[in-house]
Image: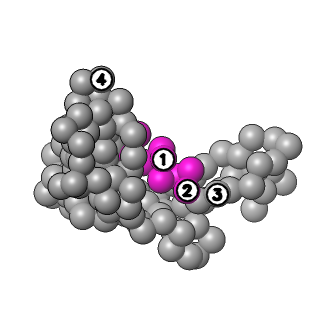
């Protein structure tokens, strides 16, 4: 353990087709549906996870919901990236004087292709 190890936070992410789970400090901090709600006209993402799931099937005609992961792999790169970023924010890490680096372990299916593996990276 180095002198600056307190500046690094370690998390584990399980990207699932149905749910995404984030573990931090040995606890499940985020367990949200892998779904994104966006505006049809602009493509702007307006909700992720449980908030997006509540809009699924009941949404206004200008809002649609999508699942950025299919069969365990990323199908919509932009939506998946935004979803992951927003879910990491849900961890609620405390602000510190110095910026905190994240070290992540991301679970992926064993049978994915090279292209799918690069998408996760």
The image quarter in which residue 98 lies: top right
- Near mark 2 (Cα within 10 A), the count class, few <14, some 14-19 or many ≥20, is few
Above or below for 76 versus 94: above
Q: Are marks 4 and 2 in contact (CB under 8 Å)?
A: no
| Percent of width and height locating residue 10 | 60, 59
Q: Left of 33 or right of it: where is 82?
A: right
**Which colour style is shown?**
one colour
3D distance between C-alphas at marks 3 and 4: 29 Å
3D distance between C-alphas at marks 3 and 2: 5 Å
The image quarter in which residue 1 lies: bottom right
Helix, strand or loop under label 1: helix
| Percent of width and height locating residue 116 | 21, 43
Decide if residue 76 is in sight here.
Answer: no
Instruction: Give the label on residue 90, or none.
Output: 2
Helix, strand or loop under label 2: loop
Q: Mark 1 = which residue?
A: 86
Q: Residue visible at 22% across and 54% down?
A: 58
Decide if residue 63 is in sight here.
Answer: yes
Instruction: Give the label on residue 92, or none.
Output: 3
3D distance between C-alphas at marks 1 and 4: 19 Å
Q: Mark 4 = which residue?
A: 42
Q: Left of 10 or right of it: where is 81?
A: left
Q: Is 88 covered by the magenta stretch?
A: yes
Given this view, does label 4 or label 2 mark the residue nearer the observer?
4
Above or below for 115 versus 59: above
Q: Residue visible at 14% across and 57% down?
A: 71
Question: Closer to the N terminus: mark 3 or mark 1?
Answer: 1
Question: Closer to the N terminus: mark 3 or mark 4?
Answer: 4
């Amino acid at each position: 353990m180095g002198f600056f190890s307190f500046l690094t936070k370690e998390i584990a992410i399980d990207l699932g087709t149905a749910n995404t789970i984030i573990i931090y400090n040995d606890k499940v901090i985020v367990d949200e549906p892998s779904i994104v709600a966006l505006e049809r006209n602009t493509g702007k993402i307006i909700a992720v996870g449980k908030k997006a799931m509540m809009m699924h099937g009941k949404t206004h005609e200008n809002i649609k919901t999508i699942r950025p992961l299919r069969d365990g792999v990323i199908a919509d790169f932009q939506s998946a990236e935004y979803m992951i970023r927003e879910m990491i924010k849900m961890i609620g890490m405390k602000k510190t004087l110095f910026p905190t680096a994240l070290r992540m372990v991301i679970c992926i299916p064993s049978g994915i292709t090279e292209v799918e593996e690069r998408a996760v990276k």
